[in-house]
Amino acid sequence: MIRGAEGFLRAMRHFVVPYSNIPLFLCVDIHDALSSTVITSTSGNEMRVGHCTKVSRSVNMENLQNEYLFPEIFMREFVHTQKYPHARLIRLGVGNTTEPIPDIITSSMAEHAHALSTVQGYRGYGAEQGHMELRRAIAEKFYNNMGIEGDEVFVSDGAQCDISRLQMLLGSNVTVAVQDPSFPAYIDSTVIAGRAGRFQEETGKYKNIVYLNCRPENNFFPDLSTALRADIIFFCSPNNPTGNAASQQQLKQLVEFAKANGSIIVYDSSYAAYISDDSPRSIYEIPGAREVAIEVSSFSKFAGFTGVRLGWTVVPDELLYANGFPVIKDYNRIVCTCFNGASNIAQAGGLACLSPEGYQAITTVVDYYKENAKIIVDTFRSLGLKVYGGKNAPYIWVHFPGLSSWDVFNEILEKTDIVTIPGKGFGPGGEEYIRVGAFAHRESILEASKRLKTLF
C-alpha cells in the first residue's frame, strides 16, 4: 500500500478526523503510484498520490456538510487533551449516560448471557421485530389505553438507527420537515437518502428541507403553515436540544395539521421519561394520531442503555400510504431485510427495566439526572443568562445573545475544561446557544458549576 493511504487509514483507526484534515488522493496508474512519493496540495487539503477505483462516490454523501456533530466534538476534546494533558475534562456535551445500570437489570442480562452457555438456554436468531414478550410489555407500559398493541411495536438497537431505517421506507420524492434546531440525525439521514437539495452557505440550510423555526419567541412550537409542502414531519418532544416539551394543545395542532395536510409525523419520544409536568409523553395521547404518526423511542437515556443499545418504533395499523397500503407492512419488510433483531441479552435487560422493581430503580437514576439539570439551570441563571429546558429533559439550552455558538463552546472548553455542544450544530436556529447536558456524576456537576461561575 502506498504511504499516503497508510497514513490516512492509520489516522482513521484512532478517531474520526474533520473533513478538512482528510487528504485528497490524486488517481494515477498503480504502478506509477508505487514508485512515487509526490505530495502536493490543493484548496487547503493535502493531496497524495494513490490508486482509485472506478466507483463514483455517492452524490448524497458529497452533499453532506462538515463532520457529523458529535464526532467533531470528540475530535475537539482530543485536541484539547493533547494541548493540556493534565486537564480534568468535564463532559457535559454528548448525551452519554454515566450512572451504573441498576443491579436488578444487569443481573437479568447476566443470567441470560450465562444461559447461552448451556444447551437448554442457548438461543440463536430471534424474531427481527423483537421478542413478543418485550413488545407487549412496551405497549402496556408506555401506551396503555392508547390502542397500541404489541405487534405494532418493533424492537431495535436504538432510535437513531430506526430513523435511518424509516428513511429507507419513504419514496424518493417526499419532502421532509424538521424542527430548527433539532437532533442532526434527522437532517443528515435525509441528505444521505437523497431528499435534500444543495446546501446553502448563506442560510446554513439545505434546499428541499423545510426548517420549522422553534425558538423562545414562539414557545418552541412552529408556525405549521410553513410546513404545507411537507410529507414527513420529524418532531421530537421533549426536544433535543432545547429541552422543551410540547403541550397537549400544541400536539393536537400538529396531529390535526398532519391529517389535513396528508403528512406523516415521525415523533421522537426518547426523553419522555424526564417529563415532570402534564406534557404528553407520547403522540398517541392525542386523538387521531394513530392515523398520522410513527413514534420512535429508546432505552438509552431513561435506562442507561447508551452502550447496551435498545429502542423501539411504533407503526400503527391505521397508518396508510396515499394508495391505502399499510405502512406497517413495508416497515416490517425493511426490518426483516436490514436487521436481524436486537441482542437477546439487551432485550432481557429491557424486559427487566419494565418490571415494577426495575422501573422503580431506573426512575431513581432519572431523578438523579433531573437534579443535575436543576443545578446547571440554577448556575446559569445566577450568572444572569437566559436558560431554557432542564425541567422536562436532561438538556439545558443557554442563550448568549450576539455570540457565535462555536466561539462560546471554544471559550468554555479553553478556560474551564468543560465540554458543551454549540447550538449551531443542531441547525441554524441554534446559533447563539449552547446545549449543556446533565449526564455526569454529581461531583462533576458541582465542579462544573464552580468553574462556570469563575468564567462569567
Image (tube, grey):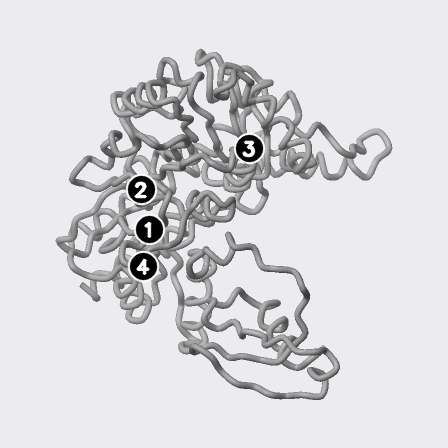
Q: Who comes first in sequence, dot 1 or dot 2?
A: 1
Q: How far apart, in angstroms, are the residues tagged by discs 1 and 4? A: 7 Å
Q: How far apart, in angstroms, are the residues tagged by discs 1 and 2? A: 8 Å
Identify the image quadrant of residue 91. bottom left
Residue 382 is marked as none
Q: Which residue is mark 2?
A: 211
Q: Which of 152/413 is in front?
A: 152
Q: Which residue is mark 3?
A: 169
Q: Which residue is mark 1?
A: 205
Label 3: few (<14), some or many (≥20) within 10 Å?
Answer: some
Callout 4 amino acid: Glu
Residue furthest left as drawn: 384
Q: Residue at x 64, y 75 (%)?
A: 5
Q: How far apart, in angstroms, are the residues tagged by discs 3 and 4? A: 29 Å
Q: How far apart, in angstroms, are the residues tagged by discs 2 and 4? A: 15 Å
In contact (CB < 8 Å): disc 1 and disc 4: no
Q: Which residue is mark 4?
A: 201
